[in-house]
């Protein structure tokens, strides 16, 4: 079976993140996205601790597409170092997992 994962991305503007993740679905880089907002983030950046409200998105995709998602995000994301990480999907509803795999493969020509 195709290796699947959940990719998490955050961004300072939830509306930007919603539009961006729509592009990822349109490009078949992920099958679906759950956008969460607001998310209160606390992080260390350049030696200082920051707190801010962000948007967070959870994408379902193939593991082999993570590099393409990262590259696409790095070209467009407002952060110098976008927060993007992937977690494997080990198990779940077989029909749903098959749907993720089907929606993230190039359309047949």
Image (cartoon, rainbow, N blue to C red):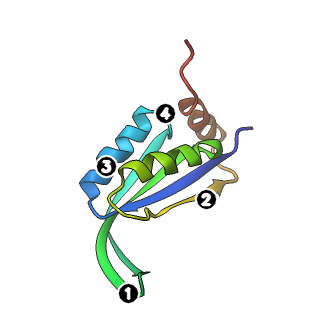
Image point (26%, 60%), residue name: 13
**Residue 73 percent across, percent down from the top left:** 43, 50
**Left/right of residue 8 with respect to residue 22 in the rendered view:** right
Residue tagged 4: 28
Q: Earlier in the sequence, mark 4 or mark 2?
A: 4
Numbered circle sitting on residue 18? 3
The answer to whether residue 40 is above or below residue 102 is: below
Q: CA distance from mark 1 to mark 4?
A: 36 Å
**Residue 103 percent across, percent down from the top left:** 53, 31
View extreme (right): residue: 1
**Residue 63 percent across, percent down from the top left:** 64, 46
Q: Earlier in the sequence, mark 2 or mark 1?
A: 1
Crowding at dot 3, Cα within 10 Å, few <14 / some 14-19 / many 20+, comes out as: many
**Left/right of residue 94 with respect to residue 43 in the rendered view:** right
The answer to whether residue 89 is above or below residue 45 is: above
Residue tagged 2: 87
Query: Would you say the residues marked 1 and 4 are in contact, meaning their CB atoms lie under 8 Å apart?
Result: no
Crowding at dot 2, Cα within 10 Å, few <14 / some 14-19 / many 20+, comes out as: few
Q: CA distance from mark 4 to mark 2?
A: 19 Å
Q: Earlier in the sequence, mark 4 or mark 3?
A: 3
Q: CA distance from mark 4 to mark 3?
A: 15 Å
Q: Secondary structure at mark 4?
A: loop
The answer to which of 62 and 37 lies nearer the viewer is 62
Q: Quadrant of residue 55?
A: bottom left
Residue tagged 1: 49
């Amino acid at each position: 079976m195709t290796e699947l994962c959940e990719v998490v991305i955050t961004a300072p503007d939830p509306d930007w993140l919603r539009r961006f993740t729509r592009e990822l679905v349109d490009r078949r880089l992920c099958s679906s996205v759950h956008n969460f907002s607001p998310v209160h983030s606390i992080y260390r950046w350049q030696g200082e601790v920051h707190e801010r409200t962000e948007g967070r998105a959870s994408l379902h995709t193939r593991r082999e597409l993570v590099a393409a998602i990262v590259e696409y995000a790095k070209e467009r994301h407002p952060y110098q170092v976008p927060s993007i990480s992937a977690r494997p999907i080990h198990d779940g509803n077989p029909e749903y997992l098959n749907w993720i795999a089907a929606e993230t493969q190039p359309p047949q020509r």
